[in-house]
Image (spheres, coloured by chain):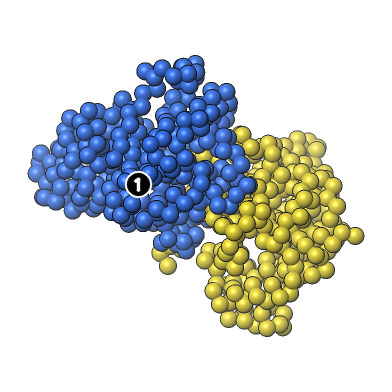
Chain colours: A yellow, B blue
Amino acid sequence: MSKYAWVTLATNDSYSLGALVVAHSLKRVHTEHQTAVLITPGVSESMKTKLRAVFNVVEEVNLLDSKDEANLALLKRPELGVTFTKLHCWRLTQFEKCVFLDADTLVLRNCDELFEREELSAAPDIGWPDCFNSGVYVYTPNMETFSSLVQYAVTHGSFDGGDQGLLNSYFSDWAHKDIQKHLPFIYNTSSVATYSYLPAFKQFGQNTKILHFIGVAKPWLQNFNSETRKVYVPSECQHLANFLQYWWDIFAEDVHSRLSPDMSGLAGALANVTLGEPRTSEQDRIEEKLRRQYWEAGNAEYVGRDAFKHIWAKIQQTMDK
Amino acid sequence: MSKYAWVTLATNDSYSLGALVVAHSLKRVHTEHQTAVLITPGVSESMKTKLRAVFNVVEEVNLLDSKDEANLALLKRPELGVTFTKLHCWRLTQFEKCVFLDADTLVLRNCDELFEREELSAAPDIGWPDCFNSGVYVYTPNMETFSSLVQYAVTHGSFDGGDQGLLNSYFSDWAHKDIQKHLPFIYNTSSVATYSYLPAFKQFGQNTKILHFIGVAKPWLQNFNSETRKVYVPSECQHLANFLQYWWDIFAEDVHSRLSPDMSGLAGALANVTLGEPRTSEQDRIEEKLRRQYWEAGNAEYVGRDAFKHIWAKIQQTMDK
């Protein structure tokens, strides 16, 4: 059995849909390595069972019940809770090396060569490219690193309030020390387009190995036609159409049949949808409810046509603090 | 006299305003090196005289009148004209090494250490960070490199239609070969904010050495109060307020008195504005005309609140080709 693992994180049943698609995308490209998922209490019992059927390792993490010193420190900084959850990946010491993948990524080609890289290897972030994006990174599980990271977080916090700011401060020599730790952008191709992005995407995008659905294009928030199994792609995401359809293909073929109505959020709603058949009025009713849920989830995650306005308001609020 | 030079490019009188501010920003940080500007026939005679008073070297480039082989090849690819103009910087062989700066940059601190870097050193672009941004780069003037670049352009074109696509294809090992050729982002800090940019800007932005006004925030297109000498900063650019004001401070103190009404575009219009005095009705009339020019220039350059929509339409058009 491989001593290497792909690791992801799911904090609720909706993100678990993403985690399941990530795992199946890895199987489709015939990875030789194991898969692991960190889950929090937000994941339902029913979903846990499905995750155990797909991942080699399902690790439940629950910061507040934990008794070690690091977590006691955390209790004084509860706002860092989300950040800390990701740090638990360093505790998977049954593996020699790991690659972390956010649940909103999609592996398009075999990337087992990533395990030849050293900690901490990652691709640049499009916001501030001297920072790496923490959606895909190579790391070495180690309890001392975990403790050190937690201690660093408690002492310094995170400049963006999330794991990306924290990890960039901790691994601060990433930008200028070793080019080998700069993963090519095709291992973490961001889905958000700027005016200089699309010509480059047209030039280099066909080489993409891992797509990262940041921003407006979360795949599970796009409208999906249950009869034709086709995803409706918003006009501003047309360059992502093939990737979004591939996500839903994996969903339809490998994930949908494993869902059950007692799951929460989108997972439970999608369990009630019948695929590949003309829609009955009952199906219409279910899908209408689903669209409403998409919409609500979408608003909460700042997607849609007004996305930039909302994001900007949030940014301003943060900057004004 | 230094054998090193800072090089910029001005294709008309409005961009010459930018070039003049760049040159004065370099003087203010006491660079030890020379300054050079490439100009095209779009720059008026009056402006040429002012540029010669400020820059050590003013080099007129005119592709279509030129007789060498490279330019004959170009005649078959006229759409590459703009790209080729920038390539002329490699012909400044009176200098041993140069740093190119776009006319929409602003040097905030002494950066003479950049001349210790080798060709081609540049900072990552925020669109596709495995490409460098061609607004700031270290290079070695050399006629063979110039010819080779022109030949490459004629043969391969440019994937984004501009100099950035061409230079990235030609210097294609930039991304993964030598970390020393990755300039820190603070040497070419883009002014365009994404949702992961602003927290990082708050963390690292105070270290910025060269700001690059890409996107909505072209300094000479912002409204400027001639009486108070303050620039009006749009709400979405508040994080750039100090930088925009600094650009206008240099304009008011070092550039404005050198302008004359026979200059074209914004330069000529700004020559008619009186600074630091209560506005007369005549001044109001001039400034109203100026605002109209700003607005028209703004529309042409896709700035303003609808910027993303316009840019997106352009991108879609390009992608659909």
Residue depicted at 18% across the width and 40% down the height? B258
User: What residue is shown with label 1?
Assistant: B2
Q: Amino acid at mark 1?
A: Ser
Query: Residue A296, image x and y in percent?
Result: 60, 53
Residue depicted at 22% across the width and 37% down the height? B50
Q: Chain of mark 1?
A: B
Residue depicted at 65% across the width and 56% down the height? A181
Residue depicted at 42% across the width and 67% down the height? A321
Residue A140 position by quadrant: bottom right
Query: Residue B195, image x and y in percent?
Result: 51, 54
The single residue placed furthest to the right in the displayed view is: A1
Q: Nearer the viewer, residue A168 or A254?
A: A168
Answer yes or no: is residue A96 visible.
yes
Residue A120 position by quadrant: bottom right
Answer with left or right where residue B176 lies relative to residue B64. right
Quadrant (top left/top right/bottom left/bottom right) for the C terminus of chain B: top right
Q: Nearer the viewer, residue B39 or B98?
A: B98
Query: Residue A47, image x and y in percent?
Result: 79, 61
The kind of secondary structure element at disc 1 is: loop
